[in-house]
Amino acid sequence: MKYLKLYSILACAFLLSCNKDLLDRPPLTSYVDNQFWRNEDDIRMYANAFYPNYFTGYNTSFTADYTPVRGYTFNDDLTGKNVQSNFESSIPTSRGSTSEDAAWMSAYAGPTWDFAWVRKANVLLDRLDNQMKPKITDEAYKHWTSVAKFFRGYEYSRLVSVFGDVPYFDKVVDNTDLTTLYKDRDNRGVVMDKVYDDFKYVLTNMRDNDGTQVLNKYIAAAFISRFMLFEGTFQYYHGLDAARSKKYLELAVDAAAVVINSNKWNFSRDFKSLFSSESLVGHPEVLLYRVYDAALTITHSIGSYQNGTEVVGVDANLVLIKSFLANDGQPWQNSTVQNVSSFSIADLMKTRDPRFEASFIDKVNASSATLLYGYKFASREAITYIGKAYPSIWGSNTNTSDAPVMRLAEVVLNWIEAKAELAQNHGGPAVTQGDLDKSINAIRNRPLDAAAIAKGVKKTAPLLLSAIPADPTRDADVPALLWEIRRERRMEFVFEHTRLLDLKRWKKLSNMDFSKNPDYFLGPWVDVLAEIPTYLTAANINKVRVKKLDGTIVTYNGSNAAQMVGFWMVENAQNRSAFSDRSYLSPVGQSQIIQYEEKGFKLTQTKLW
């Protein structure tokens, strides 16, 4: 069964309204225990409900939860006009829910205080043990137990990333068992040890293949590498538990290796094809994707918000621009590529890593606050409609481009970073040139598409252990190899799910303090009169500003248009309010604390809150 078809039939199948025989059954809630759990088809139907919650892709319609471009907009890569979005500054009235549709929190890149999906996974485990085990083979039992444990581990990984310590439930809790229902938080290490055990079971017992685009060992292993890398580095950089850090990082390496050593996926297609294709069927880099189909009214809006016209509100700043390597593999300060010191968009396209050209429109665009407009998730054809009527596939909420849910690039970057962390901080074996060639250099060797080649774009030179770049802006506490691995993630995952979570696990949330670098408030180098003369109006007097190389600021006064050449200054851009280390984790709400108290129990507030 195709993964997309699971999405498209999920509502009718799970609500039992697509089949005449099913229509004769009573509602799901009244027959689960004594009529539903009969065979693998019933188990599969139950498990399908996890897919849209965890394999979100581009979500649907205008919904932005867990989406690139519109969902993950809170990080140091992006700057908007006026004051930047703030971190949470006070304890909310409520942060809890018991709904499976509980909202996510963009400032934490994760869910609210909600254990509905944990319970759902535990229900599956309970029914497998108590109703299904005699009816299915041992292999099937272990596989579906792995599915349940995987989704439980997925949810706890997200909850821990948001709240730190959380109560751990490994079974269905009866509503009358108040002592368990209102237990206080468990230490995050204890929780993640349980998740670790679940993930180890998954890697041993999940099927290699359970159907096309359906959860299997390889897809699960890819996600396990993500979660174990996060927790392993968080434990280390936040000084929590070095032994746990090592254990989790070792599992990240092992899980990623399951995918890499299978040789089932490769980097034989161009970067842009990953994000702007109508179909990802057969794409050699994609382990799991979500299909969109207008005929089934399963559509999204992510491509529209990178079509050259729609406004996201936060856009790529000069700090991000400067982080992109030149195509000789060097930071721009050290590069010998011709015109590498030019930050005009036209020159950036030719001198930088090819992912820059594939991610941004090649000329200034007024729909971007920084004038550098992202179109990684829109096709080259989409931006030809700027100023015209867009076709439905690139306009409004009717986009039908497929969404990569998990791809090989993330797996190999998780793998190489975990290996480097183990070598640097836990006495693990040193990273070899062969390791780099299987990961970073394999990514850099992706083919270029014809449009990029026609612009003069070139592949980036490989990363060599014998010549690690000496970036003059490298943080003193980060070794050169790890710095370059982190940079590779930044170039690869622009607009995607990783940046804020990366800053949190590396304990680099201070990067969100834009007062530390004036480049956060700048865009590329522009000649306003030549490139965007429509900005030179009476209404924009004293608003349009550029910054020269020597730091001089030139403000448009109505008669100095020829002087408006320099780094674009984002209109009225200001730093966000001060924040502290408590911003690494979310507080729980006052009502959750009170609810515990009313039942005679205590819920501990998040540390530092």
Image (spheres, helix red, strand yellow):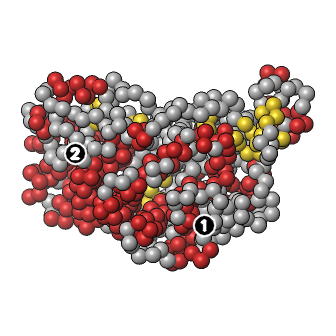
- Within 10 Å of disc 1 (Cα), the crowding (few <14, some 14-19, many 20+) is many
Q: Amino acid at mark 1?
A: Arg
Quadrant assignment for the C terminus:
top left
Q: Is residue 169 visible?
A: yes
Judging depth in this view, the residue of 361 and 238 nearest the camera is 238
Q: Is residue 36 left or right of residue 375?
A: left
Q: Is residue 182 left or right of residue 160?
A: left
Residue 330: x %, y % from top left: 67, 65
Quarter-of-image position of residue 136? bottom left
Quarter-of-image position of residue 105? top left
Mark 2 secondary-structure assignment: loop
Residue 247: x %, y % from top left: 31, 64
User: Which residue lies under the disc numbered 1?
Assistant: 444
Frontmost of labels 1 and 2 is 2
Q: Amino acid at mark 2?
A: Asp
- Within 10 Å of disc 2 (Cα), the crowding (few <14, some 14-19, many 20+) is some
Mark 1 secondary-structure assignment: helix
Question: Residue at 15% across / 43% down in the picture?
Answer: 172
Q: Is residue 211 visible?
A: no
Q: Is residue 113 above or below residue 492?
A: above
Count how many numbered circles sit on residues in the image: 2
Q: For the residues marked 1 and 2, what is the alpha-carbon distance in whole angstroms?
A: 42 Å
User: Which residue lies under the disc numbered 2?
Assistant: 186
